[in-house]
Image: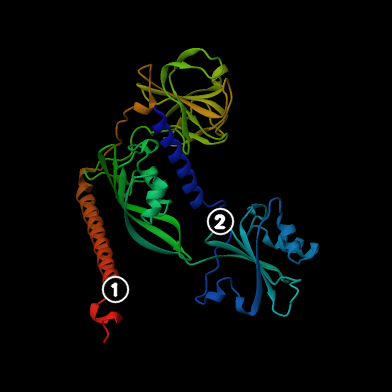
Amino acid sequence: MNGMKKGKMILFAGFLALATACGTRTEEPSEAVAETPLQEEKFYLYGFDTDTLSRKVGKVGKGEFFSNLLMHNGLSAQEACNLSMACDTIFDVRKLRVGNPYEVYYELNDSLQTRPRYIVYSRDRVRQMVFDCREPYAVYPVSKPVTTRQRYAEVTIDSSLWNDMTAAGVSPLLVVNLSDIYAWTVDFFGLQKGDGFKVLYDEQICDGEVVAIDTVRYAVFNHDAQEFPAVMYNAGDGGNIYWNEKGESLRKTFLKAPLKFTRISSGFSMHRRHPVTHRVQPHTGVDYAAPTGTPVVTIGDGVVTGMRHEGAGGNVVRIKHNSVYRTAYLHLSRYAAGLKVGDRVRQGQVIGYVGATGRVTGPHLDFRVWKNNAPVNPLNMQSPPAEPLPAALLPALDSTIAVCKARIAEIKGQHSAQVNEDENKGQVNENDDPANEI
């Protein structure tokens, strides 16, 4: 692998991790409480009239506990304890996140802001928890209004995926969805200048910002001088929902890689100098550098045939997929809970976590594949597709594709009309030019 391609792999891995972090919620909503319906008036967003109160804002500090936050903002130790107890199953006070914002509301006559009336903690950009700081204490969740809009975007990679998506006005969250859809067909760690995509998708908007990519409806990915169309069609069988225009599944028997957000630190080679022993010897696998604890998944359905410490290989999981293919996952820090030899596993199931066990210089996954008992390069392995869409459903697929293409044409037409209107507004009529006045 040359240095340029390796650099692109690292760049995409960092970009993908950042895009995912931007859109990932850090905690699950309470299962016991339904969210409070929002009233139409903006100042009743939290269930009270904010215009009648004064406000100050803050962020959860490092090492700050819920009780500390309450006392720092005017509650006594006993009041903080009572309010914490009122949370009960509604909100786990241990789930405060460092850096998350909160708002404290005081009565207008409390000029010194000594006793808060309400505290609102933002769990993310959409969801908040409201704490009523007076007896009888109350805690309830609210959500800001979220709207969904459909968009069409075209992006061609010229300098970097991040820069080119930003220039096109496309949320970086979109790449997470595309990498999932094309996980079996596009090598996202090998994107090159000239690659790109066209995509019709839905995005969720809150406070004027994109908070999530809801659904990718239709896409065409250009990679390595090939086009890969994908249309979303749910056959209702709980299986694949993305197909090409022929009704062939975009899913394959094997995933392209057994983990996400990585860089390749060492490739498949029959003459590699080992970084620890410094001896030249075969390395019949691919090393994915990743932080300790990164989930590792099986690339395909199969049966666990081995799960033990193997000396230089560290903690290893071995899987037999069929009579032809076997895989192994080396240097794991630990195995997935409950996994044991003889278990049948499904494609994408977590089987362990990245570690640095065995003879290594740092945390990574050494991933190996055998075909008919001979080692093969995982990066070059061709995977057969999953079952195609039943013939009886092809007309419905064609209809879905036609609807998507018509919608794309409509959006592009609206955009062109808007551009022309903006350009016309920007033109100065010579008869209106002050310089022509007599």
Residue position for label 2: 29
Mark 2 vs mark 1: in front: 1
Is 343 placed left or right of 413 in the picture?
Answer: right
* Marks 2,1: beta carbons within 8 A: no
Q: On the image, which quarter does residue 251 sit in?
A: top left
- In the rendered image, residue 228, in percent from the top left (x then y), is placed at 27, 42
Q: Where does residue 188 sit, x and y in percent of width and height? A: 38, 39
72, above or below 43, in the image: above
Classify mark 2: residues with Cα within 10 Å, few (<14), some (14-19) or many (20+): some
Residue 301 appears in view = no
Q: Earlier in the sequence, mark 2 or mark 1?
A: 2
**Residue 137 place in picture, x, y as percent:** 70, 68
**Residue farthest along the front direction in this orientation:** 438
Give the residue at mark 1. Answer: 425
Closest to the observer, 131 or 392: 131
Q: Is residue 327 above or below residue 206?
A: above
Helix, strand or loop at mark 2? loop
User: Which residue occupies 26% across, 58% down?
Assistant: 408
Q: Amino acid at mark 2?
A: Pro
Q: Could you tell me which residue is drawn at 27 percent across and 62 percent down?
A: 411
Tell me how far mark 2 sits from mark 1, CA to CA: 48 Å
- Colouring method of the image: rainbow
- Kindly identify the amino acid type of the residue bearing the numbered disc 1: Lys
34 left or right of 197 in image: right
With 185 as the anchor, is 123 left or right in this view? right
SS at badge 1: helix
| Residue farthest to the bottom, as pictured | 438
Residue 371 in the image: state x and y as whole percent. Answer: 36, 20
User: Image quarter for residue 433?
Assistant: bottom left
Image height of 434 relative to 47, above or below: below
